Amino acid sequence: MLRMTLCRHTAILAILSSLVFTGCSAFRETVPADFVRPSVPETPRGNREWINFIRLRQDPPSVYVIGPRDILAVYIEGVLGNRDLPPPVHLPDKESNLPPAIGYPIPVREDGTISLPIVPPIHASGLTLAQIEEEIRQSYVFRQRILQPHADRIMVTLMKPRTYSVLVIREDVSAVGGAVGGGAAGGAGGTLMTATKRGATHLVELAAYENDLLHALSQGGGLPGLDAKNEVKILRGGFRDAEERSRHAVGWSDPMFRRSVWESNPNVIKIPLRTGPGELPVQLSPEQITLQTGDIVFIESREAEVFYTGGLLAGGQHPIPRDYDLDVLAAIAMAGSLKVGMATGAGLGGGGGGASSAIFPPTRCIVLRAVNGKQVPIKVNLKRALTDPRERILIQPNDYIFLEYTETESAMNVLLNMFQFNIFVNDLFNH
């Protein structure tokens, strides 16, 4: 009697479950996936290419040209140096690739001149070392007649090149890149993007003819990472002294402060790092990539671009890659585990037993996308997507991906699960 009652209840449950799962989709009007490209815009990512980074470096001259703040080593026998003593030799720093300098340190002043004993100031800016050596000889031998012709001994070498102080501010440095609570958020396998952008500030000193964007990036943390926008901003003359530099370094974490700086200062240069087909080639002049003291290089963090999963997929929030395309199949794979559970709906929530109870896997996927202020549901047949590239639409930021059973799959899973349940009941009473 008990067995007959269980069988009767099982049959009723099967009929009710079939009625529930037949036509279970909440999306009645959908757009087929192969209609998406002409009707719903997609933004590809994988066809953008990096620019040649050599273009971010200035071309150094064949010979060094003297400028203000250079320190020269000058030896003038009998004037700067005793005839009976050898000239002083200065070894360069370990990081420097300069040869040893011979002579006494003479700085090039801001007006481009050098001051030497007895003679008037000599203009040095814009000259090479050989040319300034000849200018010194002309001044001491022919103009002032202090040294005898053909008996002078004059040497000029570079002791320390001028440097440029540049501030590199980065937002693409993440403190944490994980899920809320240290685990899954919103279901098994779901990850809630909560990375904190702590940023980093680097004050770099760039030697002459290395004061360009490429050298600033290499010394200031490297090229922009995946969390950065595909552009670099340069603020000309962003700081004039150490106090203003510190104010920028501290205040840059405030979005309102950054917005006021970019809106109020016209001396802002934006240099894209990646270009796509149909876009004009990036034109960079030497003036754009050359940096001066007081310039600020800013690498801005890109907005978090994510997609969401639900339905039979474990609910969660997942990041969209910046530099390559993510289609619907890859997005479902990224979402991880399914929560298919019992086809009757009694065990939704995932787990090993639930996944094994679904004999027919779900093949209907609905991608909910906002287009012109409206939510457009796009239907994807996963079985067809395995062989038809037109079915594999690209996932866009803020898309919602819902995995569902078709009506046939729901009904077949219910019937087969009930059949297995009946076998289990019969075995139970037989034993």
Image (cartoon, grey):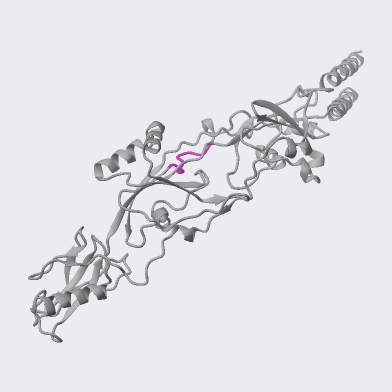
Asked whether the viewer can see residue 101, the reply is no
Task: Name the quadrant of the C terminus.
Answer: top right
Q: How many marks?
A: 0
Q: Is residue 241 left or right of residue 40?
A: left
Please give the name of the residue rendered at 73% of the width and 35% of the height, measured from the top-left corner.
39
Asked if the magenta segment contains residue 408, the reply would be: no
Q: Please say if 73 is above or below 171.
A: below
- Measured from the top left, where is residue 12 in percent x and y? 88, 15
Considering depth in this image, is 123 or 52 the residue closer to the camera? Answer: 123
- Magenta stretch: dominant SS? loop
Please give the name of the residue rendered at 80% of the width and 45% of the height, measured from the top-left corner.
388
Q: Is residue 1 left or right of residue 150?
A: right
Considering depth in this image, is 165 or 189 the residue closer to the camera? Answer: 165
Task: Name the quadrant of the N terminus.
Answer: top right
- Measured from the top left, where is residue 11 in percent x and y? 90, 18
Which image quarter: residue 68?
A: bottom left
Q: Please say if 271 is above or below 262.
A: below
User: Looking at the image, which residue sits at the far bottom?
Assistant: 150
Q: Which residues are magenta?
A: 171-178
Q: Is residue 102 left or right of residue 184?
A: left
Q: Is residue 268 left or right of residue 406?
A: left
Asked if the magenta segment contains residue 172, the reply would be: yes
Asked whether the viewer can see residue 342, the reply is yes
